[in-house]
Image (cartoon, rainbow, N blue to C red):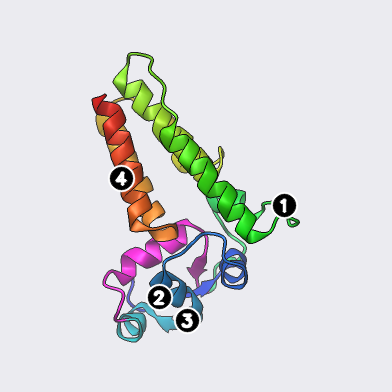
Amino acid sequence: MNPTTSFTRTTIGREELQTPKLGLRPRCRQLLFVLDGKLTVDQLRVTMSGIADIEGTLQDMLKLGLICATGEASAHSPAPVQAIATAPAQTHPATQHDDLADKLNQAMHHSTDSGNRFEDAKHHAVDMMIALFGAKSSHVAKLALAKNKTELLTEVSACKKILGAVASSSKAQSFEQSVLASLQN
């Protein structure tokens, strides 16, 4: 990442600060708050020294459509975040979070037993990501297209990073462990 690049919040990033929906960790939320389009990556390293991996956090926020490099279209956002951010306006944010938690719990405890461990694990991972980010997520598509265990685990690792950024490291760990358990059953 270019140390002189500066970032600003997108529309979705601004909405997330006003009405939290993604359950960002406090440090990530603080970083989102200070991104004003003026501070460079180098300046952020100094200003936000409590964030060990500032570049990784910025990359995750870029993938989620919360931020963009200064000068880029601020309305840009990937499909997973649009699916969450454009939920019906009449739904209270706490209700959305509760519904999301319920969907995740159902997906984590729902298992198929086709006799093919790889396919069962793949379906399990896809179900969980759909519960969190919707069916249009690029990660859902990549998980569904995995042809072997290596491809699946690579995509699970990418999903785990995103879950860690938007939810919590424990939820991200649970996601990964549940997929690994499905592979071993």
Name which residue lies at 34% across and 81% down: 48
Kindly report the distance in space between the C-alpha atoms of the residues bearing marks 1 and 4: 30 Å
Residue 69 horizontal/vertical position (percent): 48, 70
**Position of the C terminus by quadrant:** top left
Kindly report the distance in space between the C-alpha atoms of the residues bearing marks 1 and 2: 35 Å
Residue 15 horizontal/vertical position (percent): 62, 68
| Residue type at tag 4 | Ser
Residue at which label 4 appears: 157
Q: Secondary structure at mark 1?
A: loop
Q: Secondary structure at mark 3?
A: helix
Upstream in sequence: badge 1 or badge 2: 2
What is the number of the mark on residue 5?
2
**Does the rendering let one see residue 145?**
no
Going by the image, does 171 lie left or right of 91?
A: left
In this view, the residue in front, 58 or 167, is: 167
Upstream in sequence: badge 3 or badge 1: 3
Q: Is residue 158 magenta-colored?
A: no
What is the span of residues highlighted in magenta in the rendered image? 49-70
Kindly report the distance in space between the C-alpha atoms of the residues bearing marks 4 and 2: 27 Å
Upstream in sequence: badge 1 or badge 4: 1
Residue at which label 3 appears: 34
Going by the image, does 63 lie left or right of 86?
A: left
Name which residue lies at 55% across and 53% down: 81
Name which residue lies at 49% across and 57% down: 64
Kindly report the distance in space between the C-alpha atoms of the residues bearing marks 3 and 1: 28 Å
Residue at which label 1 appears: 88
